[in-house]
Amino acid sequence: MISIPPNVAFLRLAMCGLVLGLVGCEPGGTAATPRGPGKRPPTAVVAEAVLPRPMRDTIEAIGTAVANESLTLTSKVTDTVTAVRFDDGDFADAGAVLVELANEEESALLEEAEATVNDTRLQLERLEDLFKRRAVPVSDVDVARARANEAKARFESIVARLNDRLIRAPFAGVLGFRQVSPGTLLAPGTAICTLDDIERIKLDFAVPEVYLAILEPGMTLTASSAAYPDLFFEADVETVGSRIDAVSRTAQVRAIIDNPKRRLRPGMLLTVLLEARERVSLAVPEVAVVQRSGSAFVYVVTDSDGDTPVAALRQIRTGARFKGWVEVLEGLSDQERVITDGVIKVRDGSPIRLLDRATLTG
């Protein structure tokens, strides 16, 4: 008896297995039953009819909140702060005095100018009375009238200089943190505090140029903020930008939000949702659409020669997406059935078995 080395025996077994696999035999010597595509059992799926449904164009964007009016208060003159009449975060009415500057010199000059105005007015009245009685020439009256006007102009100039030492709120709004204290020497351009009118908020956002044709002033949109996850703020489109950004190919849009409770603040990030062009179109569920190489496909239920229906892959042209539905512009007809559940298990031409959704999920 010849002894076969173990490594040779292993090689023989391996070769035998390869040969058996090539001829389609089972290890016991029986030929394997062929399993061609026609023998594949039908795949259980759920299909829905293609029907007309209400659709809208939905535009989503990210916007920034901007105050309706906003500025940094500064002084027109150089002088010392004598009083600060506000606290951080106060609401100021339009015209309210916020800061007072030293005005001793101007106050003295105002008293002098007021006295001069009164004196020149009295002289003018006397000369006008004498002129009526033809006691003085008209030239004397003209000179007195000029002096009175000059004194009045000087008086008004000093009043204006005094007003410059009272820093007022030019419009109603919320004050920021104050940057000055009594005794601070203010110079023109020195920041005192910020003032923002946030009763109305401007919402600025950008949209792709493809939506330019459907955007117009007066459209309504909704905005939301991460700071208030349960609140939605309605806004009206006020202006559509006159230019398209050459780099991003977007147009700037500005909407207005009423903000009476002052929840929104300038600089906040808001999510914008705008819906337009309401219409009725053929639509399929989003789960039925298969994306391949930038194109959209669906599996349509077709009848085969026998009793078993077949899944047929068909390319479609899609439009808007709205609340889980995809608008179909080309490729499907009304009442055709498309596979919505079991899409990943079927192939083009494979047999299918139609079930209702409850049976499939159960």
Image: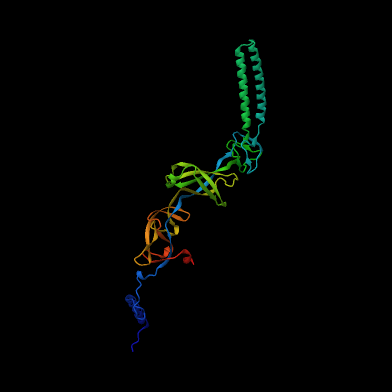
Split into 4 quadrants, where in the image is the N terminus? bottom left
Side of 80 where 295 appears, left or right: left
Q: Position of residue 147 (x, y in %)?
A: 62, 19
Q: Position of residue 115 (x, y in %)?
A: 67, 23
What colour scheme was applied to this rendering of the protein? rainbow
Side of 36 where 356 appears, left or right: right
Q: Quadrant of residue 192?
A: top right
Q: Position of residue 141 (x, y in %)?
A: 62, 15
Side of 29 where 104 appears, left or right: right
When the figure is inspected, residue 175 is found, relative to residue 136, above or below; the finding is below
Residue pictured at 49% horizontal, 46% vertical: 205
Residue pictured at 61% horizontal, 29% vertical: 160
Q: Position of residue 225 (x, y in %)?
A: 55, 50
Residue pictured at 66% horizontal, 27% vertical: 110
Give the number of callouts.
0
Could you say which is closer to the camera, residue 149 or residue 286? 286
Could you say which is closer to the camera, residue 126 or residue 99? 126
Q: Quadrant of residue 52?
A: bottom left
Could you say which is closer to the camera, residue 61 or residue 86? 61
Could you say which is closer to the camera, residue 50 or residue 69? 50
Side of 225 where 9 appears, left or right: left
Q: Quadrant of residue 138?
A: top right
Taking the view exactly as shown, the residue that stands out farthest to the bottom is 1
